[in-house]
Every structure is written in structure tokens, then in C-alpha cells.
Image (cartoon, grey):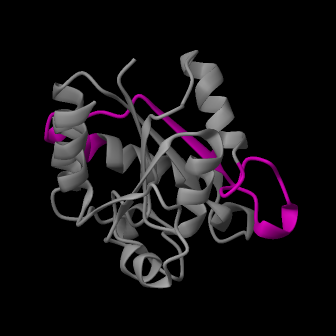
Amino acid sequence: MKLVILDRDGVINEDSASYIKNPNEWIPIPQSLEAIALLKQNNFHVVIATNQSGVGRGLYDISTLNQIHNKMIKMLQDVGGAIDAIFYCTHTDEDDCNCRKPKIGMLEEIEKRFACSLKKIPAIGDSLRDLKAFRGIGAQPILVKTGNGEQTLLDKKYPKNTLIFENLFDAAEFIIANY
């Protein structure tokens, strides 16, 4: 199965230290929607795995999260793209759940839903917690420099086998050519 896992904030859309709390704050990173469309056109299943602790912190509710995702899905449809599934964790770090990245519970759920191993599957994130989770499940960690990516790159704590790209579009082109 041709599958790609994407973090959301900082990879697909602009991130914010004060969280993306409503659809108006959800702004796609240039070429990110086109990157997803390109992956879909090349027969990849595209899955999002995103921490959304803003729900757990009471900053927005599940209904608002769904509205944000509906905006993303509509904008993707407008450029010929689609998402096969969205997995999210609404817990905070204090909840110590197994689904919040850098833990791998959310990724294990993806394995179950798609009945496949994530070993060596390309997985794209912008933060250390994304890359640690991807490494923990055996996926191929890919760092984009958008969102928190530049800082993650400077910190140099990411897994040694991490591939690094400017943005989601560049990563998508590499994945299409190599997977």
C-alpha cells in the first residue's frame, strides 16, 4: 500500500503558538494543498496524524475542530486533493495518554485501520515529537522546514535517519519518485 502520514499544523497549514482555534485561523502553507493533490494523483493514501491539545485545554471543541477539518477538505477538493483519514489526539501532555505524539498510539490506530505496517512508510512532520513518534513505529521520518521545522533542525535532536525538505511539496515530489 502506498501511504503517507502527515502532521497537520506546520506541515499543511501555518502553525500558531496560540493554537489554530477556528476555521479562519486555518491558513494553508503555500503549495501544501497541491502537494497532497499530487500524492493522491500518484495513488498514495494520505493520512493526517495530529495532536490537538487545544480541545483538551478548552480553547475550542470537537465541533470547531471538525469545522477546521471541513475547511481543509473543501480547499483540498478545489485543487484535486483529498485526505483518506484524519487521526487526532485531543489530550494534553498532562493526560499522559498513549495517543499523543511522541507516543505511538495514534500511529498504531492507523496501522489497524489500514491493515498495514507503517515500517518504512514516509511520515512528515515539523517537530521533534512528530519525528520521535514516526521513528518509534518504524516509519521513515521526514522533517519539513515549515512550521517549527527550522527550529527542530537547529536543535539537532531528530532521528539520524530523518530526511529533510524545504516544504511538503518538495517532500511529496521525493516520495513520488522513491516510493
Q: Quadrant of the C terminus?
A: top left
Question: Which one is nearer the viewer's eye here, 166 or 7?
Answer: 166
Q: Is residue 52 left or right of residue 126?
A: right
Instruction: Give how far across and how far down residue 40 sits, in percent.
Output: 23, 29
Q: Is 98 placed above or below 17 here?
A: above
Residue 142: name its quadrant.
bottom left
Q: Is 25 placed above or below 23 here?
A: below
**Residue at x 38%, y 70% (from the top left corner):** 25
Whether residue 84 appears in magenta in the rendering, the answer is yes
Q: Is 83 placed above or below 166 here?
A: above
Using the rendered image of the protein, determine whether residue 175 is visible from the camera's viewpoint: yes
Q: Is 14 placed above or below 2 here?
A: below
Q: Is residue 132 left or right of residue 74?
A: right
**Residue at x 67%, y 58% (from the top left corner):** 102
Residue farthest to the right? 95
**Residue at x 40%, y 61% (from the top left corner):** 23
Residue farthest to the front? 160
Instruction: Give how far across and how far down residue 33 sits, in percent.
Output: 22, 49
**Residue at x 57%, y 24% (from the top left corner):** 117
Range of magenta residues: 74-103
Q: Quadrant of the N terminus?
A: top left
Using the rendered image of the protein, determine whether residue 77 is visible from the camera's viewpoint: no
Instruction: Give how far across and how far down residue 150 sits, in percent.
Output: 36, 79
Instruction: Give how far across and how far down residue 77 sits, in percent.
Output: 22, 36
Residue 146: name its quadrant.
bottom left
Residue 39: name its quadrant.
top left
